[in-house]
Amino acid sequence: MTRPLLSLANIEKRFGELRAVNGVTLDIHENEFFALLGASGSGKTTLLRMLAGFEIPSSGSILLDGRDISQVPPNHRPVNLMFQSYALFPHMSVAQNIAYGLEMERLPRSEINQRVDEMLSTIQLAHLAERKPHQLSGGQQQRVALGRALVKRPRLLLLDEPLGALDKKLRGEMQLELKHIQNTFGITFIVVTHDQEEALVMADRIAILKDGALLQCGSPRDIYEYPIDRFAADFIGIMNFLPSRVDAGALSAADGSRISALLPGDLKSGDNVLAAVRPERLRLGAADAENCLSGQIRAMAYHGLDLHLHLDTPLSSQPLMVRLTADAAEGHPFAVGEKVTVGWSAHDTRVFTV
Amino acid sequence: MTDRKPIYLMTPALAWLTAFMVVPCLLILALAFFQRGTYGGIVYELSLDNIAQVFDPLYGRIFLKSAGIAALAATIAVVIGYAAAYAIASMPRRHQPILLFFAVLPFWSNYLVRTYAWIVLLNREGLIVSFTRAVGLEGELPQMLYTETAVVIGLVYNYLPFVILACYAPLSRLNPEIHEASRDLGASEWTTFRRVTLPMTVPGIATGFVFVFVLSIGNFVTPALLGGGQFQMIGNLIYDQFLTSNDWPFGAALSMILIAIMMGLLTLQTFASEKASGQQRSEKVDD
Amino acid sequence: MTNRSSLRLMLLILSATFAFLYIPISVLFALSFNASGLPTAWTGFSTHWYAALITNSDILGAALNTLIVAAASTFSATLLGTLLAIGVEIRRRRGHFLETLIFAPMIIPDIVLAIALLSFFSMLDLRMGLHTIIISHTVFNLAFVCAVVRARLKNFDWSIVEASSDLGATTSITLRRVILPVLMPAVVSGALLAFTLSIDEFIIAYFTAGPGRNSITLPMQIFSMIRFGVTPEINALAVLVMTLSVVALAISQRLNRGRLPGQ
């Protein structure tokens, strides 16, 4: 493998007693769309601000193209940030906002004008070039913020909750547009987000942060299908957890029934564990499956594309969630209180220590 | 942003304040402990005589009198100012800024001019006298100008706009739903005012009162013009020490006492508003 | 307040307050146009008291002095106060001592500041005159400018400062191209406030002007005229001075409200 574009080694950031970032080591490659995913307080924003240069790591190094930039001030880094609040200059027009960063590089006027014009057409705002930021919609402001950072052709573009302020529908469109723009420009993007769906949709790779430390890093599929622990499993998507105990190479559930799973090697008989299965892996009426169980419908939620059933089962005090596609639910007039049987296979069962 | 850069921005102003406010004030503090020479001037011998002299019954009376007048003016100003602020806050939202603007506007005209206006009104040949004559009231009106009443009226008049502003701020920030909630829970309009609105607007009242009191007790212009030298307040006393009797050390001692009173009151006021804002913060948590 | 009687009470309170606030001023205003200049009788409309002002060289000299003092102290206070405000707000840590120092000039009784500066200047054996008034007015004016600018900075989006730095600007470029333009309405508003305060300030000027008639300002002139007795010229002068400060304040208020949207 070639040298990574960005290489974080053992980054730490302390604010007094608080360790906001605690020993993060991470490589990010040229042209990658990378997501830093975490809840608030996970240290993701602090990490991003260290990459931008607004915070200096307490220890550790940040290598960009092999050069340690951890002490370089923000205005001397080939890294740009798209701010969560967009941070557009309120007294400048759209075009002036975009030109600002190029003016700082003391480029000739003609080149600045040309690059600003190109960027305006890329972000489809050429017709609003003379508007002030407050005359734009949220989505338009967001595109100006993106264009203003992108026009500098940074080695690395950082995006802090880029879609957080947009409504749901616009967010979906912008996710695809961001991916498209990243592809066209061939610039490495690092997105900070708390929205797992956003990370799954956009990123090539995702790093989950928890309490300032790196919990798991991998492709969206890895992260979704093979969460490293209970926290990661719960954080991404929905997961049914069934408390159980290891018993002679298999699992026995709370009511004594057996759960088939591929057990990790390091478990001993008598260990308390959680068996876990995604709602979409449960199939209706699959009496032939390796795991099979019946329950009573407690509640139903119709989502258009799919139908969620919450079942009361003897396996857990928490209702079991089943997600049926519209196809699978077709022709079943489910009713609350009805008994149904669901099944799932052993290789869809994950096992986590408690 | 590191913490070092702002220093350069702040340095010129802080240097200015140090040279022309802190040092002069320290100088006054030091002066208070020296003595007046026989023919004026300053004798650099440490003594507590000036401080003791402040508490001499002769000057003590002036202090008490000043404090009394200041407290009276502050009380009247707060009562009128709170009522006016309450009235403004109960008008439709869109009219409030303009009402407030006109309530505060006189505050920005010249202090001397505003005081002078009352001389014109209260004068022996003034408007009020002419008016009562015109409506046919016979008999001699009591002397109005150059009385204590005139001084109090002048102080209230001059500082009322500020009190309105100070009281309006917390009143306008009150969530109207809190008022409605109290009414919904069965309280009368008056009980709601007494138990809900008034306690939540104490900081504004405290600010208004302290402001008027502090500015009044050290006031020099109003007693000089409307009191007509009939009686002295601390401000005039300090003025006299510096510009007529030439006893700077005693004048300095008087100023220090004035500052001490002021700082004491401001501390009290900070305490009152912190207590009240603490209450409001806990209400926010309860939401 | 929905019911009618309480609305009527509120309107009554408002009318009474506004009457109390505006009748004295209006009387002055009317008198200044009264031909006789006396409150006893209206003898016809006339502007000759205003004309009399223009020919009074004492008043003209005082007015000129006032303008010099106000302009100079406003200039220095705006410069110092704006930089101070930015410096204080950029700092994340707030020092109690610093806050008190900045707040003090606004609340210290003016008689105290006046005698302190008088003692200070005479101890330095400084010849007093307009320049010492300017120095003294700058003290409280810079605190007021600072307060106005800080109020604007309270809801200032600091991320635009970071954005500027992120896009390659140095601190001084950011100050010049981002912070100051965004703050400009507040700076101008603070300057107008300072100008108004300086025009009206009497006690500190009175103590720091030094002896002689050369450095008499308009409020000092008005004070001695009032002490001398009620004369028709004061009415006209009072109305002019009042109008000047009110106009400056109105502009200042307007600017402060017309702040850039989107902030």
Image: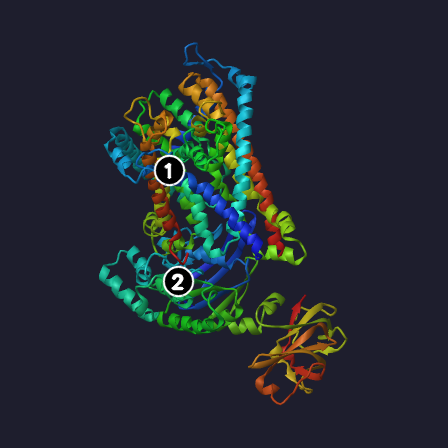
Q: Percent from the top left, x then y, of residue C151?
A: 44, 47
Q: Look at 40% across and 63% down and name the residue there.
A: A157
Q: Secondary structure at mark 2?
A: strand
Chain containing the residue with disc 2: A
Circles 1 and 2 on the same chain: no
Q: Tell me: residue A11, above or below residue A32.
A: above
Of residues C8 and C110, which is closer to you in this image?
Answer: C8
Q: Tell me: residue B280, above or below residue C199.
A: below
Circle 2 residue: A156
Res C191 quadrant in image: top left
Q: Secondary structure at mark 1?
A: helix
Q: Look at 53% across and 22% down and name the residue there.
A: B62
Of residues A106 and A121, which is closer to you in this image?
Answer: A121
**Which numbered marker is on residue C28?**
1
Query: Which residue type does callout 2 highlight?
Result: Leu
**Which numbered marker is on residue A143?**
none
Q: Percent from the top left, x then y, of residue A89?
A: 36, 57
Of residues C88 and A216, which is closer to you in this image?
Answer: C88
Query: Which residue type does callout 1 highlight?
Result: Leu
Cα distance in 3D space between marks 1 and 2: 70 Å
Residue ranking furthest to the bottom: A331
Q: Tell me: residue C238, above or below residue A64.
A: above
Q: Tell me: residue C256, above or below residue A80.
A: above
Q: Look at 75% across and 76% down and name the residue there.
A: A314
Q: Is residue A341 left or right of residue A127?
A: right
Assess disc 2: are there few (<14), some (14-19) or many (≥20) residues with their C-alpha within 10 Å of its C-alpha.
Answer: many
Q: Is residue C121 visible?
A: yes
